[in-house]
Amino acid sequence: MSRIARFAGACALALGLVAGVGQPAFAQEGVKIGILNDQSSVYSDITGAGSVAAAQMAIEDFGGEVLGKPIELVFADHQHKPDNGSAIARRWFDNEHVDAIFDIYSSGVALAVQSVAEEKDKILVVSMASSRDISGKNCSSHGMQWANDGYAVANLTVKGASTAEASTWYFITVDYTAGHSIERDASKAVEAAGGKVLGSARFPLGTKDFSSFLLQAQASGAKNIGFIGGGADMINSIKQANEFQIAAAGQRFVPFSLTPQDVYVLGNDVTKGMPVVLSFHWTASDETKAWKDRFLEKTGRMPSDPQANIYSAVTHYLKAVKAAGTKDTAAVLAKMKSMPVEDFFTKGAMIREDGRLMRQLYYAEVKAPEEMADKDDLLKLVRSVPGEEVFVPVAESDCKLLKK
């Protein structure tokens, strides 16, 4: 059994997570939170058991109870299957008295679960998922997007990777909803900057060999090869791009979903200069450093951006329940959207009517090995950008909630 699996099991035992076993009747009346994410596949390192740990930290910091009742926590693996995710959500809402679901980190699953949450009058907070449809054409009064989305990542990555001269791009894109959405937004950003997209190729989730895609990208002659995908797929693509000597041949390999966790795996020598768009990084302030130290002590791993956002979202939800004096969904949603989000890395951010948290984001680049002060000094934070400058503008949104 892996250390992550053991850790998840320990969380389950510590919190009494197995629903319905030995729970007193009053526990069913308290607030119950669900973490639904990838526990075993390509994104489990940046969500998975670490997201459960982050939620547990938020509950502990809140005192373990709200409205005089214990706060409960459950978790499950959606396996990147919308049907599976929506089935778990229905069971949690109907039979296990879950009040709010957090995390997801899969656009297809997020869209399915958001529909269920609205039907059941419950709450969904997506820590990070790329499809703009979640707070766009499929927006819901019961759903929220807490961290980066595909539009913001495409926007900041293209702008950050662009030079004074108009440039050319070729995209290698994962073949699912989120990938398609990011490619569309990135293409628009390229064209808005006067650049040109020379072509694209799509790959299935879980691809091991990217050689044919890289050869197509090389043959296009594009100055930038944008890779839209994450987790193990992105790690494999970067390794193989390095083997193909993409950079040495004069093309820039630009991953759109690189995380500090990926840099640990690949090393700064391979990833130096690559862009990273994120809302949380442990070097940003004394508060982020202190929270990182707590998370590291608890899990044995450095925290990811989505995991920090789980802490933020769960904390804000619990504050809203307390302020509302009830766990009634309508009252809690009203408080969540009227109260500013304040935590160790979020300052005064507000939730827009479409559910988008208008937080600041960072554009960062991976440091070269000689620039690093220590093994965890991975990134240089190039600039922070207000949410109003990076997320979909109201005028461009197709969310019905913004048209009132």
Image: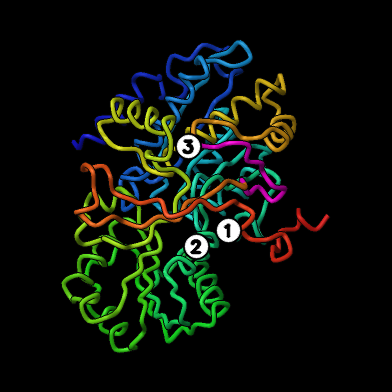
Residue 31: give x, y in percent of width and height.
58, 23
Give the answer, above or below, for where 265 lies relative to 75: below
**Image quarter hosting the C terminus:** bottom right
**In which quadrant will I find the N terminus?**
top left
Q: Nearer the viewer, mark 2 or mark 3?
A: 2
Q: Circle 1 sits on which residue?
A: 390
Q: Depth check: 131 or 387 in front? A: 387
* Residue type at tag 3: Ile
Could you tell me which secondary element the residue under label 2 belongs to?
helix
Residue 24 position, x and y percent, is: 51, 11
Give whichever of discs 2 and 1 has the lower sequence position: 2
Amino acid type of the residue that numbered disc 2 sits on in the rendered structure: Leu
Q: Residues within 10 Å of mark 1 (few under 14, many from 20)?
A: many
Q: Nearer the viewer, residue 86 or 229?
A: 229
The answer to whether the residues at label 2 and label 1 have Cβ atoms under 8 Å apart is yes
Looking at the image, how many numbered discs can be counted on the residues?
3
Q: What is the chief secondary structure element of the magenta stretch?
A: loop
Q: Residue at x 35, y 76 (%)?
A: 225
Q: CA distance from mark 2 to mark 1?
A: 7 Å
How is the rendered protein coloured?
rainbow
Q: Residue at x 29, y 89 (%)?
A: 219
Residue 74, picture quadrant = top left
Q: Nearer the viewer, mark 1 or mark 3?
A: 1
Q: Is 134 placed above or below 240 here?
A: above
Which residue bears the numbered disc 3? 310
2 and 3 marks in contact (CB < 8 Å): no
Queried whether the magenta region covers residue 348, the answer comes back as yes
Q: Is residue 112 left or right of residue 281?
A: right
Residue range highlighted in magenta: 345-357
**Tag shown at residue 156:** 2
Dot 2 or dot 3: first in sequence order is 2
